Image (cartoon, grey):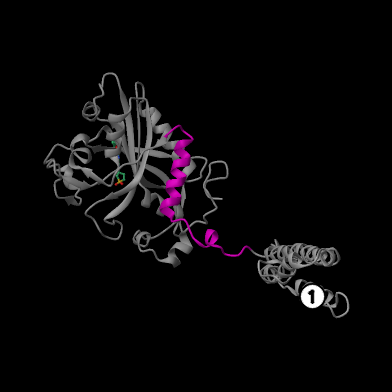
């Protein structure tokens, strides 16, 4: 670096040039390039500093401060520029991220998707029964023939098994026949054999039947409930089912009718209808001149208690079962069952629920 011609012209020239480059740096990357070209290992200023070593003491005394001064000026300019660029980048990001709250909500994934009516109803049921002290139990879709039938008082070869015709799988290594469960009742057996009473559980889940027509599909959904302790009686059952119906169908009053029925796993058994009125395709629940069957129930059969190692003289209980697809169609007015399983986005957009509308008893199940 020739420093002869007129003192320090070149140094000033370099300083001027470097400070212009710093000023002209458009972003942090460009600034870093300038910094390296000046102060990096092979930087112009660094090279100058290295010349100090070869100078005479007089020259160094004279030029040292000038060169060090240049280094400091360039460094200070780079630091100041870095801050300016950082602020500009932040302002740019903030202005880009400025949320105009007056704008309609952009349909993000969280608002574009829809909760399937089945999932919505399972959420509602869980909220309603949790409020009555019930926990949720779940189990496998592939069950043993014993847990799906025998333990539930369906003796082998019993015709009632025909009612529950399902998909039978090849016997497992223990020769145990496996079936796609026809109800969620096996989970109740699992619960009764894995925890001591008192028991209060609901069991929502997929169930399978060899059935496919206008109102039946091979796979559908059920929720069953079970209460086992020492005093549980049919009056408690009626109260729980009445509370459920009022809250689920969001009516203050509901007239219910218990019709004697038969299920191998309950004795006595009943099918339950609620009163309703049909006007122009609309169904109003709770009162009216019509009845709608919504569930089956009964006192748990002593044989089933014994099968679970419970002494019927010490423990008793009741259970119920209902089709989730069915009560969803009733409550939300879907005419046909099959679209439930056809994943037609138009149907989901029409009958689905907004993800953020979490059903809660406080906010009213469906706000
Ligand atoms: C145990 C003891 C008793 C569960 C029950 C029903 C009546 C019932 C049907 C409703 C509509 C099946 O989906 S559906 O077709 N279910 O009517 N379910 S009592 O009783 C049990 C279950 C397990 C250990």
Q: Position of residue 99 (x, y in %)?
A: 69, 62
Mark 1 element type: helix
In this rendering, is residue 209 above or below 5? above
State the predominant SS element of the stretch in magenta.
helix
Total tally of numbered discs in the picture? 1
Q: Nearer the viewer, residue 63 or 278?
A: 63
Q: Position of residue 303 (x, y in %)?
A: 21, 28
Q: Nearer the viewer, residue 211 or 46?
A: 46
Q: Quadrant of residue 33?
A: bottom right
Left or right placement of residue 93 versus residue 12 in this view: left
Instruction: Name the residue: 20% across, 40% down.
Output: 149
Q: Position of residue 277 (x, y in %)?
A: 44, 50
In this rendering, is residue 350 above or below 148? below
Is disc 1's CB within 8 Å of ligand 1? no
Instruction: Name the residue: 17% across, 44% down.
Output: 161
Q: Residue furthest bottom?
A: 5
Q: Nearer the viewer, residue 153 or 94?
A: 94
Mark 1 highlights which residue? 14
Quadrant of picture, ligand 1: top left
Q: Which residues are magenta?
A: 105-134
Q: Quadrant of the N terminus?
A: bottom right
Q: Position of residue 333 (x, y in %)?
A: 44, 57
In this rendering, is residue 17 above or below 246? below
Q: Residue furthest right?
A: 6
Left or right placement of residue 40 versus residue 181 in this view: right
Judge the density around disc 1: few (<14), some (14-19), many (≥20) Cα neighbours within 10 Å. Answer: some
- Based on the picture, tell me whether residue 165 belongs to the magenta stretch: no
Is any atom of residue 350 visible in this view?
A: yes
Left or right placement of residue 104 versus residue 84 in this view: left
Is any atom of residue 153 visible in this view?
A: no
Q: Residue furthest top?
A: 314
- Based on the picture, tell me whether residue 119 belongs to the magenta stretch: yes
């Amino acid at each position: 670096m020739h420093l002869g011609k007129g003192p320090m012209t070149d140094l000033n020239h370099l300083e001027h040039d470097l400070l212009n480059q710093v000023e002209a740096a458009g972003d942090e990357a460009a600034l870093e390039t300038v910094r390296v070209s000046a102060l990096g290992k092979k930087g112009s200023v660094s090279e100058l500093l290295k010349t100090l070593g070869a100078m005479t003491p007089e020259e160094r005394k004279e030029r040292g401060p000038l060169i060090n001064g240049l280094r400091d000026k360039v460094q200070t300019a780079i630091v100041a520029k870095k801050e300016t660029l950082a602020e500009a980048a932040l302002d740019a990001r903030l202005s880009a991220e400025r949320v105009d709250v007056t704008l309609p909500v952009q349909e993000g994934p969280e608002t574009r998707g829809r909760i399937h009516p089945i999932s919505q109803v399972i959420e509602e049921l869980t909220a309603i029964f949790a409020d009555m002290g019930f926990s949720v139990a779940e189990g496998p879709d592939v069950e043993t023939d014993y847990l799906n039938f025998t333990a539930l008082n369906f003796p082998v070869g019993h015709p009632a098994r025909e009612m529950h015709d399902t998909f039978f799988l090849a016997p497992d290594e223990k020769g145990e026949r496996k079936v796609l469960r026809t109800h969620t009742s096996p989970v109740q057996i699992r619960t009764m054999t894995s925890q001591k009473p008192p028991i209060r559980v609901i069991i929502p889940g997929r169930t399978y039947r060899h059935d496919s027509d206008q109102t039946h599909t091979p796979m559908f959904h059920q929720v069953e409930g079970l209460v086992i302790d020492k005093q549980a009686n049919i009056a408690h059952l009626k109260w729980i089912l009445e509370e459920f119906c009022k809250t689920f169908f969001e009516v203050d009053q509901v007239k219910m009718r218990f019709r004697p029925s038969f299920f191998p796993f309950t004795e006595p058994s009943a099918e339950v209808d609620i009163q309703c009125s049909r006007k122009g395709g609309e169904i109003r629940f709770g009162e009216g001149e019509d009845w709608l069957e919504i569930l089956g129930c009964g006192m748990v059969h002593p044989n089933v208690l014994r099968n679970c190692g419970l002494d019927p003289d010490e423990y008793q209980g009741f259970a119920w079962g209902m089709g989730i697809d069915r009560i969803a169609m009733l409550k939300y007015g879907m005419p046909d069952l099959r679209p439930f399983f056809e994943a037609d986005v138009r149907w989901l957009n029409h009958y689905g629920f907004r993800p953020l509308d979490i059903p809660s008893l406080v906010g009213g199940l469906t706000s």
